[in-house]
Amino acid sequence: MDVRNGMGLRPLGTSAAEFEQDLLSNLYYRRGTTVESASTQDAYETLALTVRDRLAERRVRTAAAHYAANPRWVYYLSAEYLLGKQLEQNMLYSGTDRIARIALQQLGMDPDEVESLDVEPGLGNGGLGRLAACLLDAMATLDIPAVGYGIRYDLGIFKQTFSDGAQVEKPDDWSYQGNPWEFPAPDDQQTVFFYGHTERDEAGKTTWIPGEVVLGEPSHMLVPGHGTDTVNIVRLWRARGSESSFDLSRFSAGQYAEAVDEAVHAENISKVLYPDDSTDSGRELRLKQQYFLVSCSLRDIIRRFRLRNSDWADFPKKTVIQLNDTHPTLAIPELMRLLVDEEGLNWDLAWALVRQTFAYTCHTLLPEALETWPVPMFERLLPRHLEIIYTINEHFLAEVREAFPGDADRVRRMSLIQEEPERRVRMANLAVVGTQAVNGVAELHSELLASTTLRDFAELWPDKFHNVTNGISPRRFIRIANPTLSSLITEGLGGDEWIDDLDRLAGLEALADDASFQARWRAVKQANKVRLGLGDPDSLTDVMIKRFHEYKRQQLKLLHIITMYHRIKANPGQAYVPRTVLFAGKAAPAYHAAKHIIRLINAVAAVIDADPAVSPYLKVVFPANYNVTLGSLIIPAADLSEQISMAGKEASGTGNMKLALNGALTIGTLDGANIEIRDRVGGDNFFLFGLDTPAAVALKENGYRPRDHYDRDAELRHALDSILDGKFLGIGREVGESLLNSDEYLTLADYRAYVDAQDEVDVAWQDTETWTRKSILNTARSGFFSADRTVRDYAAEIWHVNPVKVAR
Ligand code: 8GP
């Protein structure tokens, strides 16, 4: 039932005329202006509010249904969310996309111009943050009662610009103009403690006397499901100084900076997203951020639990908390603290409840990406939590000693505290010990976690380890990103049910050889290239879009480009397959090696562009500031998807799935989810090359010498020499030297196989019909990579939750 009826409110209309009326009303009452004097910003905010209003009613109904059901909830804790723009999504999900555009036109406004003001909240770095957003989308679509918790960073991931081809970072003040999608919830504000010391009374009860108190101010954004009435939320916390943090007497004395010192200090906690994708910044502020997120969220989770429940024994029955990597792992000792110190539960009962409540997803294999914190810093910031971790460790190591008597080395490796070379708290170990399930994000990754990175733990608790292969939102990454292909698919399949049931794409197999369907498939790709506006739409669009990291090997792609350049220079008369190579992605600001690669790419692009013998065949483009919005433009235009990481390094990848779903063919190694993509699309429709994980490991163990490959392969030598000799505007010697002298990620070892596979790509491209067939089959066979399937896997294997349908 429409809750508004009971409240005597009028239901919002579904016609363009009614939408227009609501626009006018919102313009007047919420922006205080009229059509005649509205700015584009006024129009945008009003449009957003009018769309939001239509989801708000579903949200109210969802909350009522959840309250009535008192279900088991999924609480997703993540330091990062890359949500992407909200407007287009919310128009689609609320069914207002068509009427909104008509209404705007009726009012004399340009819908495209108005919509262009929607800003992407860049509250994440890369794959991990975007996965969080895709999972929220799928949970809502599958009617799973869920709340995402995160931090409302004032400044999101930096804006990337280029100066002389080098990456320059600019702050991303994403909500400078306000954020119409956000609902503040001041009633649910929380208080967070830091520093100080602990005290114990005679009864043994411990109290934490904090040295700093900060407020956590929540707001939430709506997370609507597609094709259902469920609207979940993502609740983001912002740090605030308490009222007393403003020093009025200092202000009156003219000491303006000092007067706000304390408040500024507090607010810095949610000031900026840490821009490192895989390395530990080691800064106290980051640990503070993590505790801030955890402390606010747990208190909110408990508040919600108490709305319908009173017995702590029921807590794990009603609550599963998924830790998105180790960033929110402090939730484990924090829940222990709340249960033992504040609620007075005994340790053993509290520990049993905690362990049943949490689950942990690991997103990496790189040992340097596993977080650890120096004990002295940890102790200063969170004195009580360190005591709790010590106690957990004592009990845990006793368990290890019992299971593996006399194995002191194992005990040392598994301890929650690293002793050498300095004492540090190991967050991944804590995350495994304090949870009921641990999962990797692709089959290979989960196997490698259990056999290498977390092997000791998998030997102790084999049943705790799971695989849940990542997935992507079909709504965002094909329906919204690629509307023309979506229409063609809907026509081909005779309905649009595939959007929420992606396995139905298999029906396209029957059309893969149909000449007229193929022609239309190509026309869509062509139009998407034109829409992207980079390079010749007839050329093979070859894309590598992802964070810059040496393990992902943008440098390998670059060596291939330089090789193509040399071949064309050597034989200018010949016909070559024209290619547009597109790079996009950011490097962590302190990751110098990755930034050198960026600079070299831009230099190579400039040299090629200036060379009339080469530029008709080869163009390198590198649009700045890759984000969800730019990705959504590039992915539908891609012919070839570069997934060329060193085997055993990429946990999963999700860009690989987005590109395959949009009909790009993959050239890739046997790494991460590439393996599962190839298994499904078929070896004939995938360009495989390079060392597999065992071969890569063996090569490194036997003493890898990159120079051997350089000495042996003339084309490789030519490519590397041209870098070392400064042929590309004098840029990139660091890249060349690092490849020749260390090449940690086996770039040179895979070079020949890669270039040969690229030659096969050129051959395949020239057979247009066969290529189109492969492209259609890639889409047809990508249904497995829907985030809906991923969420179903989590729900069945790890969460054990059931959907709650929201009645109309
Ligand atoms: C990424 C992985 O690199 C990528 O393979 C995977 O697809 C994605 O997570 C989603 O599972 N990892 C991160 O983005 C990341 O920030 N990892 C740091 C925490 C180590």
Image (tube, helix red, strand yellow):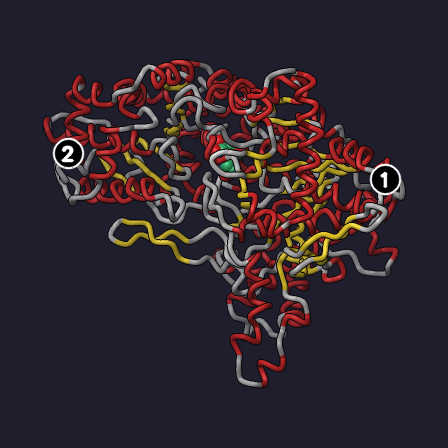
Q: Residue at x 40, y 57 (%)?
A: 170
Going by the numbered disc 2, the residue's amino acid type is Ser
Is disc 1 in contact with disc 2, using a CB cutoff of under 8 Å?
no
Query: Where is mark 2, residue-wise?
Result: 722
Q: Is mark 2 on a helix, strand or loop?
A: helix
Q: Residue at x 61, y 52 (%)?
A: 381
Q: Which mark is residue 391?
A: none
Examine the rendering and report whether any part of residue 792 can be seen. Answer: no
Position of 362 compared to 57: left or right? left
Q: Is residue 706 above or below residue 8?
A: above
Examine the rendering and report whether any part of residue 791 can be seen. Answer: yes
- Where residue 630 sits: x, y (%)? 43, 45
Specify the quadrant that holds the C terminus: top right
Query: Where is mark 1, residue-wise?
Result: 312
- Where residue 635 sits: x, y (%)? 43, 37
Position of 447 compared to 722: left or right? right
Q: Residues within 10 Å of mark 2 (few under 14, many from 20)?
A: some
Q: Is residue 291 above or below residue 661?
A: below
Q: Residue at x 42, y 19 (%)?
A: 670
Going by the numbered disc 1, the residue's amino acid type is Trp
Pick whichever, 383 or 522, lies toward us.
383
Pick whichever, 129 or 701, lies toward us.
701
Single out the residue that lies furthest toward the bottom. 253
Work out whether mark 1 precedes mark 2 in sequence or the reverse, and give the earlier one: 1
For discs 1 and 2, the disc positioned in front in the rendered view: 1
The span from disc 1 to disc 2 (Cα, nearest Å) is 67 Å
Q: How crowded is mark 1: few (under 14 residues within 10 Å), some or many (20 or more)?
A: some
